[in-house]
Amino acid sequence: MNLTRTALIGLLLGGSQGIWADTLALKQGYPETYMVRSGDTLWDIAGHYLQKPWQWPTLWQGNPQIANPHLIYPGDRLQLSWVDGQPRLMSAASGSKRVITLSPRVRSENKLSPIPTLSLDAIGPFLQGDYVFSHAGEARGLPFVLGNNDKQIAVLEQHTLYVQGLLEPGRQYGTYRPGRTYKDAKSGEWLGQEAVLTGIVQAETQWNNGQTQARLLANRREVRQGDVLLPLPDDVQGQAHFTPHAGALRQAGRVIAIPNQASAAGKLEVVLIDKGGQDGLDAGSVLDIRRPGVAYVAGDTTLHDYRDTASSFDRAFHSGINQRLPSEAVAKVMLFKVYHRLSYGLIVQSQDMVRVGYSVGAL
């Protein structure tokens, strides 16, 4: 029978007072061994073992005899052991489908694809085609759609189009149109601009005049003259491997957008936050999302009114108008695509819906 065991990691040094680091707390009923299955994610497996799955780097030991020991494959057998009183999870490959022998010491993965950190169903479309212009004017100078000889205002699928700029023949490109501009809510400073994916084209022939003939493979929206082109990633799955960890965010940020302009987002849905690489974040960073406390008006008695429903008299004449209830943690988000000042994240835990304007901070 499994017993819940808690490993003390140590002291965090710094500040005027010593504080204890979070303890590595195993989840009640954790498995001693686990056989990885197709469809598993790294976050799922971390959740089988840890009360705080973002502590995965402390638990995971990998297998030093495997090339890329941080990757986990379907068919791997995970074994929990104890080293100097600390829990450690290790992987042992299972069966010939997993590895081939290269030398007495190092083995390399064969055939199977490693499991992603998060569900590709949820983040794959964003890894494949979504883009944010990180600098004003970034779209200028990119190849752009000239049109076609059918004089189509909106190019039809499987039709030829011409691009101003030289593209790599055989490679696929996304066509994009500048969308919403994101600004800092307080300073108004420019953070980035949405690049709306309108279609996918394949480059065919380069011409001496600096133009490229291409074919429109798929429409996402109308592909029009002036849409700019960016190369699509060759390996989306390769971008889906990163390590969950507590995000080192010193100053709180905000949820500034929800894709498709939805009013709210729940578990396994994507949000955009106004913090990025320049703030010390990277793919795998896990952060808290907090709902702001409600403002209320302090009345003359013990009865207080919510500011939104208080009378105009109370809002105008009572001094307590700026008082607020405490904020509440409602979700946790893991970042998977990080730009300079913006990041896409997937909500991995949720007690309530997340809305634009909710704060984002360190765990």
Image: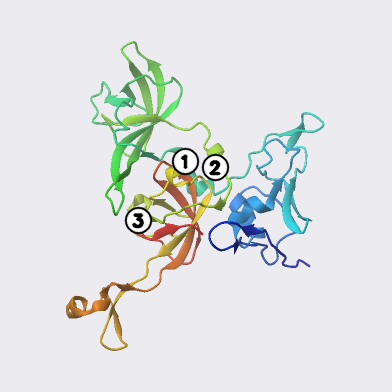
Q: In this view, does 33 lie above or below 6?
A: above
Quadrant of residue 149 within the rendered picture = top left
Residue 205, x across and y down, in percent: 39, 16
Type of residue at label 2? Answer: Ala
Quadrant of residue 147 within the rendered picture = top left
Residue 83, x across and y down, in percent: 78, 54
Q: How busy is the neighbourhood of tag 2: few (under 14 within 10 Å), some, or many (20 plus)?
A: many
Q: Are marks 1 and 2 in contact (CB under 8 Å)?
A: yes
Measure the alpha-carbon separation of dots 1 and 2: 8 Å
Type of residue at label 3? Answer: Ala
Q: Is residue 306 above or below residue 349?
A: below
Type of residue at label 1? Answer: Leu
Is residue 122 toward the left or the right of residue 184 in the image? right
Q: Residue 301 carries which label?
A: none
Q: Do the residues labelled 1 and 3 touch (CB within 8 Å)?
A: no
Residue 145, x across and y down, in percent: 30, 26
Question: Residue beneath label 2, please?
Answer: 240
Question: Residue beneath label 3, please?
Answer: 262
The mark that comes first in sequence, 2 or 3, is: 2
Look at 54% across and 49% down and name the residue there: 119
Question: Residue beneath label 1, please?
Answer: 127
Label 2's element?
Answer: helix
Which is more toward the observer, 327 or 213?
Answer: 327
